[in-house]
Image (tube, helix red, strand yellow):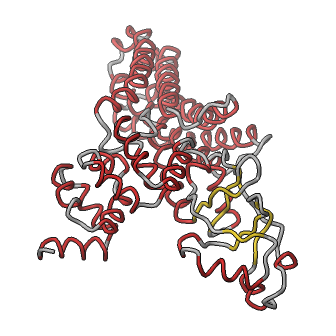
Amino acid sequence: MKPIESLVFSYVEGHPKEAAQTFEKMEVSEASKIIEKLPFRSAGILLERLTPQMAGEILSRFDLSLTKDLLAAMTPRHASLVIQHLEDKKREEALSSLPTHTERQLRELLNYSSNTAGGMMDPRVTSVPDDVTAQGAISILRKAPRQTLYYLYVTDRDGRLIGVLNMRDLMLASPRERIESLINRQVLGVPETMERQDVVNLMRRNRFLAVPVVGADGRLIGVIKHDEVLRASQLEAFEELQRMVGAGGDERALSPVSIVVKRRLPWLCVNLLTAFLAAAVVGLFEGTIQKVTALAVLLPIVSGQGGNTGAQALAVIMRGLALREILSGMAKRVILKEVLAGFANGLAIAIVTAAAVWIWSRNEGLALVIGLAMIVNMVMAGLAGAAIPIVLKALNRDPAQSSSIFLTTVTDVVGFASFLGFAVIFLPLLMK
């Protein structure tokens, strides 16, 4: 191995996460040339930590033999994520070239959505049959690969999960004692179809290091590890953040332009329509604005404060929905709380704003108009920020999906309408 290759090898082995970050800054062609020269194990470690899209692009540049060896060097979970980014023909060729057991594992994982327990699990898990002795169980565990041991799961001869063993009880048991008497049958297995967010909440609530995944027939088919849940939690948070502003939840920094346009353009069109709606409201009061030009200067203040108030309420409600803090029957209470908070904050902000506008314009009417509009808009912003995600959830829609776009529409329209409406009502005072 050349000195430079030895240096890269040491860097990848010693600091795989930092190495992946460095490689992601490279061009794919350059990264491919370096990875091609690394040992399979080191290359597999590195590819697992790259984004699946970049890892897929790198693999697509290699011949079938090298692609097969690199996929085999990765965990089935990561390999299934990467192989999805290969072209259909090469993906099928790569799968067919793998050992039968590995091929079957990857094909099974490819059938699951990444948003389910099946898509999160590692199919490599060791279990102990329930009809063996303590000595036989220990023998099975000694022969098992270390990465397949989490908890000591027990299954029947058909592979159905029936319990879990305590390591202390197993070590202290008589060698000939059957493990049936040692099994804790209060084991919690999650179905393969359970939603990712439900899995995250379950493991966070129970503080499990791992949780077994069972098929429809109760068979143990895999295990979800704690580090996968941490990764899923981060991914879920980022996806919700992206969806709230109209970007695709599956977008990544290196996503192709075609994907970016496909995910964002529809919501940009919706945003454009709502902007025209807000502009139409302003157009209804064009004559009033011509008479009092200061109104045009102050419009952004009203809509801006409403937008901030709504965003605060939206963020808190989204967190409550994600962590299951808002249970059935609590919607009215939560919305009322945000309305009252909007009123209290709106009253305080209205006093400060009115005072500032009076100092600036020496016009009591203008100060009164913006103060009243501020209260109305911040109350409506609190109502909309709380109600929009709750209503979407009740309609079985994703509460994060562009909630901020709908919220901005409400705060802009209500803000403009209330401010200019009060201006019409108090126009004589404004004309002084």
Q: Position of residue 416 (x, y in %)?
A: 46, 22
| The image quarter in which residue 205 lies | bottom right
User: In which quadrant is the C terminus drawn?
Assistant: top left
Q: Residue at x 48, y 44 (%)?
A: 239
Residue reaching furthest to the left? 3
Towards the viewer: 138 or 326: 138
Q: Residue at x 24, y 59 (%)?
A: 23
| The image quarter in which residue 220 lies | bottom right
Q: Position of residue 28 (x, y in %)?
A: 21, 49
| The image quarter in which residue 57 lies | top left
Q: Residue at x 43, y 25 (%)?
A: 267
Report whether 289 appears left or right of 408. left
Report whether 282 appears left or right of 290. right
Q: Position of residue 405 (x, y in %)?
A: 47, 29
Towards the viewer: 16 or 265: 16
Up-down relation of residue 29 to residue 373 (above or below) = below
User: In which quadrant is the N terminus drawn?
Assistant: bottom left
Q: Position of residue 355 (x, y in %)?
A: 44, 40
Towards the viewer: 354 or 315: 315
How many marks the image carries: the answer is 0
Up-down relation of residue 388 to residue 295 (above or below) = below
Up-down relation of residue 34 to residue 64 (above or below) = below
